[in-house]
Image (cartoon, rainbow, N blue to C red):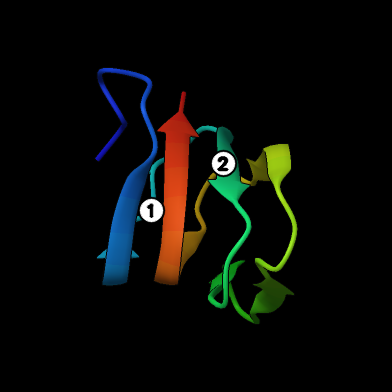
């Protein structure tokens, strides 16, 4: 699920399964949002560019209508 070429990839609706380590998520501004969490969810609008948001290990990640880059 990692962006192997380090480029941003658009996802209309994508669920990424948890891994045990923290991951870094960046996105380009748009009209979408991302949700992540373990027992609750943090929701972030993607209306501005953002770099290296930490997604904690064990979190499920949902990306909606957003161009993202996911790194280990």
Q: Position of residue 45 (x, y in %)?
A: 69, 74
Write down the quadrant of residue 5 in the picture: top left
Q: Please tell me which residue is depicted at 32% across the width and 55% down the height of the picture.
A: 10
- Judging depth in this view, the residue of 42 and 48 nearest the camera is 48
Q: Callout 2: helix, strand or loop?
A: strand
Q: CA distance from mark 2 to mark 1?
A: 13 Å
Mark yes or no: residue 22 visible: yes
Q: Mark 1 = which residue? A: 18
- Judging depth in this view, the residue of 47 and 42 nearest the camera is 47
Q: Please tell me which residue is depicted at 72% across the width and 45% down the height of the picture.
A: 50
| Mark 2 and mark 1 residues within 8 Å of each other at the beta carbon | no
Q: Earlier in the sequence, mark 2 or mark 1?
A: 1
Specify whether 58 is left or right of 8: right
**Nearer the viewer's eye, disc 2 or disc 1?**
2
- Judging depth in this view, the residue of 8 and 37 nearest the camera is 8
Question: From the viewer's perspective, is residue 11 above or below residue 67?
Answer: below
Q: Callout 1: helix, strand or loop?
A: loop
Q: Position of residue 23 (x, y in %)?
A: 54, 34
Q: Residue extending furthest top?
A: 5
Specify whether 62 is left or right of 21: left
Mark yes or no: residue 16 visible: no
Q: Please tell me which residue is depicted at 63% across the width and 46% down the height of the picture.
A: 56
Q: Please tell me which residue is depicted at 46% across the width and 23% down the height of the picture.
A: 72
Quarter of the image with the N terminus in it: top left
Specify whether 31 is left or right of 70: right
Write down the quadrant of residue 48 in the picture: bottom right
Q: Residue extending furthest front?
A: 30
Number of numbered markers: 2
Question: From the viewer's perspective, is residue 12 above or below residue 29?
Answer: below
Query: Dot 1, how many residues are within 10 Å of its Cα: few (below 14), some (14-19), or many (20+)?
Result: some
Q: Mark 2 = which residue? A: 25
Specify whether 9 is left or right of 23: left
């Amino acid at each position: 699920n990692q962006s192997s070429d380090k480029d941003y990839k658009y996802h209309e609706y994508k669920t990424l399964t948890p891994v045990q380590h923290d991951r870094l998520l960046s996105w380009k501004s748009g009209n979408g949002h991302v949700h992540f969490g373990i027992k609750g969810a943090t929701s972030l609008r993607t209306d501005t560019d953002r770099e290296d948001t930490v997604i904690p290990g064990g979190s499920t990640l949902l990306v909606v209508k957003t161009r993202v880059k996911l790194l280990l």
